[in-house]
Image (tube, rainbow, N blue to C red):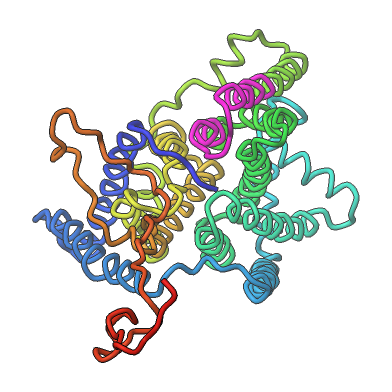
Amino acid sequence: MRYYRSGANYILWALYGLMVCAVLTMQARTFCLLLGFEKVQWYLLVAAGIIFVLFFLLFLPIRLLAGKMGDGRKEGRFGRLLEGLYLILIIAVSLALRLLGMKEAAEGGRGGVLAAVSGFPFASLTFSSLYAWLSLTLSAWMQDGVLAAGFLRPLYETLGILLFYPSLRALAGRIPAVCVTASLSLLPFFSDSYGTGGQEGFFLTASAVLLLLAALYLEKLSDKKKTVWGYAILFGIPAGAAVFLDPIFLTFLIFALWASLFVSGAGSAGRRAGGIVSLLVSALLGFICLSALQLFLSGVNLMEMLAGRFAPFPGLSVHGLFAAASEGWLFWLFPVICFCVFYIFGFFDQRGNVGSVWLPSFLFSSFFSFFVKNAEPESAVTLLCWLIMAGMGIHSACCRERRRPVQEKEGSEAQEAVVPVSSVRPGEPLPNPLPGPKKHAHKQMDYAFEPGEDEMFFDIDQVEEGDDFDL
């Protein structure tokens, strides 16, 4: 897909740059503290040096090499075969790595499930309680319920990774899709996830489903020959219900609404507005349905329910996710932040402007995790947004927007100089900028036979005395 760009995107880009540079500085500070530099603020120089190295030693060389290699958008049977092999490999690796820790996940998941179901069933309709209900339902079907819950986690996490690829492939391209799925499969981003019962993977799987529905909606919106309201409802109702279960899922609703404003090929403004209104109404419908169910089950009034569910959580650290996890996962999170820095430089001429529509969702999820609620399950969605922007950074370095050169005119008219408008005198007609018919070339007529000098005379000039003419 391709997206337009407006002035608001530049404001969001500035906020994105401030956010990424602030997190990079925090990581540099943690690194300096680990090395023992506590008194002098070396981390500011370290952060500035990292940005300098990223731009001059990595971003610019990659951009130059990508420009020399040319446009690699040719799609063929070999490319589709490689994508299929990649998906098979990534599924196998994801399942293998998660099945190796299945026993530990089952033992650690016991405490997580029991903690999530205190006051269960349906004391509060949240995403964590939904996960606990699914785990208990599976436990009732099988003899060893804890082991079943541990086996469930590799399945739905791998399913989420599999769903992420086609959705991101359609929305952003092959490079971000490969970066996100490979990172989710291989890197241990979630510390102590076994103790929380694997809720992070469940959040990611739900995010993959919502993102796939959003991709379907935006694909139909970008094709003005197809109706869009049905796909808007298909995405809006689950998105509204997910926002009620956990406010962090507002990230994907914000993305779909913002992308609807700037996706190319949507046709008239009325069609674009119709899709947005259908999306908002259906999301509100899904939110109201779960709100009514929560009021029926809990017995509290509406204001108490909304205040308890959406009020800011006091007493949380402003450092949020990355500061809390930096000591244990500095090595894993640092490359993600560095690739996010790439997008600061590649924002201006990225192919298709595919990264600009993710900026509101990225800023919302980061603000939510840093300042509102930095619990570990919700941080999975924030990390997903950072991974997506890291993929956008790599994409912006490798794939720049190519301006189509104006085709040169062929023929004799291409040699004629165009008269500038400023040189036209008053009263004279303006030159026609449109190509006209070829000018007629005058041909010079000549004889096919040229007589010699001795033959250049008329017969009457050679009359002799004896000649007799009948005059």
User: Residue at left 89%, top 54%?
Assistant: 142
Front-most of residues 94 and 140: 94
Q: Position of residue 353 (x, y in %)?
A: 43, 47
Residue 246 is inside the magenta segment: no
Q: Is residue 449 above or below residue 218?
A: below
The relative height of residue 37 versus residue 343 in the rendered view (above or below) is: below
Q: Which quadrant holds the C terminus? A: bottom left
Q: Relative to residue 105, is residue 135 drawn left or right? A: right
Q: Can you give x and y, in whole percent of width and height, for residue 332 in the image?
A: 42, 64
Q: Tell me: residue 408, above or below residue 81.
A: above
Snapshot quadrant of residue 224: top right
**Measuring 73% from the left and 15% from the top, which residue is drawn there?**
292
Classify residue 240 as left or right of residue 336.
Answer: right
Residue 410, can we see it? yes
Residue 328 makes an appearance in the image: no
Instruction: Return the x and y of residue 456 as percentages of the image width and height.
Output: 27, 84
Q: Which residue lies at the image location 42% right of the left edge and 40% below the top edge?
A: 359
Horizontal relation, residue 140 to residue 289: left or right: right
Residue at the outermost left position: 40
- Residue 311, image x and y in percent? 49, 20
Q: Which residues are magenta?
A: 254-282
From the viewer's perspective, tell me whether residue 414 is left or right of residue 56. right
What residue is rendered at 68% in x and 54% in y? Answer: 163
